[in-house]
Image (cartoon, rainbow, N blue to C red):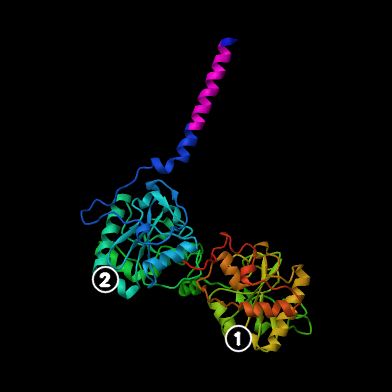
C-alpha cells in the first residue's frame, strides 16, 4: 500500500513538473527562439532602432514572438511619398507596424531580428511575413541608387537565410516576395487599393536579384474566387458561360410581387428577362441594392450576361421594375457572401447622383423594397449585415465579404447617400458606416482604419 502511495506521489510530481516546463517554454518562447543574424555582410550593418528616429515614447503596437522558420514571405511597401517619421507615426496611431524601413539615404531602421517578431500589418499574411518599407514615392525610389542597393542587399540576406524564392508568383502560398498591393488583393484588410509603385520597384529588384517578376494576370489563380478582390477573366467567362434559364430559354414565369411589371396574366415581361445559368435555390431573408453604373436597361442586361452575373430584379430609369430571374427563390450571382441569403436588386444608373435625381425610380425602389420586406420578413435596416436580415448596399457586402475587384475607398454601389434616402423614406432606419455592427472589429475583409500602410 505504501509503495502504491509513493508511486502515485511521484507520478503527480512528474506531471506537475512537465506541465510547468511546457508552460515556461510557451511563455518564454520568444526569448529562446533561435534568431537568424542577417547582417553578416560587411556593408550591411544592423538597423538602427526606431527610437533613434522618433521622438516620444510611442513606438507602435507591441510585437509578438515567433519562430524564424515560420517566415516565408517578404512584403514590400512605400511611404507613399511621406517622410519615414510621418509614415511610422501614422501607422502607429492606427495600431499598425512594420519590421524595417529603408530611408532615402539608404539607412535601415527597425528590428535587428525581424524574423523573430510578428507585427500587425497586413491581415492574412502577418504570421509568416517580414514587412519592409521604402521611404519615398515610385519615382524617387527608382532613381535612388543607394536606397535600391541597400534594399537589394537586405532582400538577398533575408531570402538566403529564410529560403525565400526570388519571385512574386503565388501569394496564396505566402512563399515569395510580394508587394503590399498584391497581398491586399488576395487577403483583403484594406480599403486603399491604390498602387503606390511597389510593383515597379519589385520588378526592378527581382530583375537585379536574378529572380522572376510576374504581372498581375500571371499571378497564380488570379481569377479564382478565393481572392478578396477577385479579378474577372471576361474571355474565359464568355467561353464557359452556358445559359440554361431565362429569356427565350425557359417558360415566362409568373410574378408574385405587385411592384413588378407584369402581363394581364401576371407573367414577367419576356423581353426584359436575363439569360443565366441555374445555380440553385435560396430562402431569402434580406435584400441587397446595387447600381449598374450603366445608363440603359438593355446595356445593363447585356453586360450582366457577358459577365455571367444576374440579379433578382432590375429597376429601369423610367420607374418600372422587372423580375429577371425565373423565380424569387433562385440563387442570384451579384454580391459575394450574400447571394445565398438575399434577393438582389440592380438599379439602372451611371452613378449615385444619377440615382438620387430620379424621383420616379426612387419611388419604385422604395415600393419594391417595402413589399419585399413584408414578404420575406426582414427589417428596413442596414445595421447588421452579418445577420442577413435587413436591407444592404453592395458596398457594405463587399467590405464585409469581399469578392469583387470593383472595390475602392470611394466605392459607391449604389452609394450610402442613396441608401439613406431609400431607407428613411421607406420608414426604416439608416446606419452610417461607423455605426454598422462591429465595424471596428477584425471580422471584416476590408478593415476600417484611419491610416493603412
> Closer to the camera, 79 or 303?
79
Q: x%, y% of residue 346? A: 63, 78
Q: How many marks?
A: 2
Magenta stretch, residue numbers: 3-20
Quarter in which the N terminus is drawn: top right
Between 400 and 210, the residue placed more toward the observer is: 400
- Residue occupied by mark 1: 353
SS for dot 1? helix
Of tags 2 and 1, which is closer to the observer? 2
Q: Residues within 10 Å of mark 2 (few under 14, many from 20)?
A: some
Q: In this view, does 440 lie to the left or right of 170?
A: right
As rendered, which of 388 and 399 lies closer to the eye? 399
Sequence order check: which comes first, mark 2 or mark 1? 2
The reply to whether residue 317 is visible in this rendering is yes
Magenta-highlighted stretch: main secondary structure?
helix
Residue farthest toward the front in the current orientation of the protein: 56
Q: Residue placed at 65% from the left, 62% from the top?
A: 386
Q: Are marks 2 and 1 in contact (CB under 8 Å)?
A: no
Residue 62 is tagged as none
For disc 2, the marked residue is: 144
Residue 440: say if magenta: no
Find numbered disc 2 in the image and state the secondary structure of the residue it sits on. loop
Pinpoint residue 316: horizontal percent, then vertical percent. Answer: 66, 85
Amino acid at each position: 500500500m505504501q509503495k502504491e502511495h509513493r508511486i502515485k506521489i511521484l507520478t503527480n510530481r512528474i506531471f506537475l513538473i512537465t506541465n510547468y516546463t511546457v508552460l515556461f517554454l510557451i511563455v518564454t518562447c520568444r526569448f529562446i527562439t533561435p534568431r537568424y543574424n542577417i547582417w553578416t555582410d560587411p556593408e550591411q550593418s544592423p538597423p538602427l532602432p526606431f527610437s533613434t528616429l522618433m521622438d516620444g515614447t510611442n513606438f507602435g503596437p507591441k510585437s509578438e514572438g515567433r519562430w524564424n522558420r515560420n517566415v516565408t514571405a517578404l512584403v514590400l511597401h512605400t511611404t507613399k511619398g511621406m517622410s519615414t517619421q510621418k509614415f511610422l507615426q501614422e501607422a502607429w496611431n492606427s495600431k499598425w507596424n512594420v519590421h524595417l524601413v529603408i530611408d532615402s539615404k539608404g539607412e535601415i531602421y527597425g528590428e535587428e531580428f525581424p524574423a523573430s517578431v510578428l507585427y500587425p500589418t497586413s491581415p492574412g499574411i502577418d504570421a509568416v511575413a517580414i514587412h519592409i518599407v521604402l521611404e519615398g514615392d515610385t519615382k524617387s525610389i527608382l532613381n535612388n541608387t543607394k536606397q535600391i542597393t541597400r534594399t537589394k542587399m537586405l532582400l538577398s540576406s533575408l531570402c538566403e537565410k529564410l529560403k525565400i524564392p526570388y519571385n512574386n508568383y503565388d501569394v496564396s502560398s505566402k512563399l515569395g516576395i510580394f508587394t503590399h498591393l498584391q497581398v491586399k488583393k488576395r487577403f483583403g484588410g484594406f480599403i486603399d487599393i491604390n498602387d503606390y509603385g511597389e510593383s515597379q520597384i519589385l520588378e526592378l529588384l527581382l530583375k537585379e536579384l536574378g529572380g522572376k517578376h510576374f504581372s498581375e494576370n500571371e499571378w497564380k489563380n488570379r481569377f479564382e474566387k478565393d481572392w478578396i478582390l477577385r479579378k474577372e477573366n471576361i474571355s474565359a467567362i464568355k467561353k464557359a458561360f452556358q445559359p440554361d434559364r431565362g429569356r427565350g430559354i425557359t417558360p415566362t414565369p409568373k410574378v408574385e410581387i405587385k411592384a413588378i411589371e407584369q402581363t394581364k396574366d401576371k407573367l414577367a415581361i419576356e423581353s426584359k428577362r436575363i439569360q443565366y445559368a441555374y445555380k440553385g435555390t435560396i430562402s431569402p431573408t434580406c435584400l441587397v441594392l446595387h447600381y449598374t453604373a450603366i445608363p440603359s436597361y438593355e446595356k445593363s442586361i447585356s453586360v450582366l450576361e457577358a459577365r455571367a452575373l444576374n440579379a433578382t430584379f432590375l429597376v429601369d430609369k423610367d420607374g418600372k421594375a422587372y423580375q429577371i430571374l425565373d423565380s424569387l427563390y433562385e440563387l442570384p450571382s451579384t454580391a459575394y457572401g450574400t447571394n445565398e441569403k438575399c434577393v438582389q436588386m440592380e438599379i439602372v444608373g451611371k452613378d449615385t447622383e444619377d440615382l438620387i435625381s430620379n424621383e420616379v425610380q426612387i419611388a419604385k425602389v422604395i415600393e419594391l423594397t417595402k413589399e419585399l420586406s413584408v414578404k420575406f420578413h426582414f427589417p428596413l435596416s442596414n445595421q447588421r449585415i452579418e445577420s442577413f436580415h435587413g436591407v444592404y448596399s453592395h458596398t457594405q457586402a463587399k467590405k464585409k465579404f469581399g469578392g469583387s475587384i470593383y472595390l475602392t475607398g470611394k466605392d459607391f454601389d449604389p452609394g450610402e447617400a442613396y441608401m439613406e434616402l431609400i431607407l428613411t423614406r421607406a420608414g426604416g432606419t439608416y446606419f452610417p458606416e461607423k455605426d454598422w455592427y462591429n465595424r471596428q472589429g477584425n471580422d471584416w475583409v476590408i478593415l476600417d482604419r484611419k491610416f493603412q500602410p
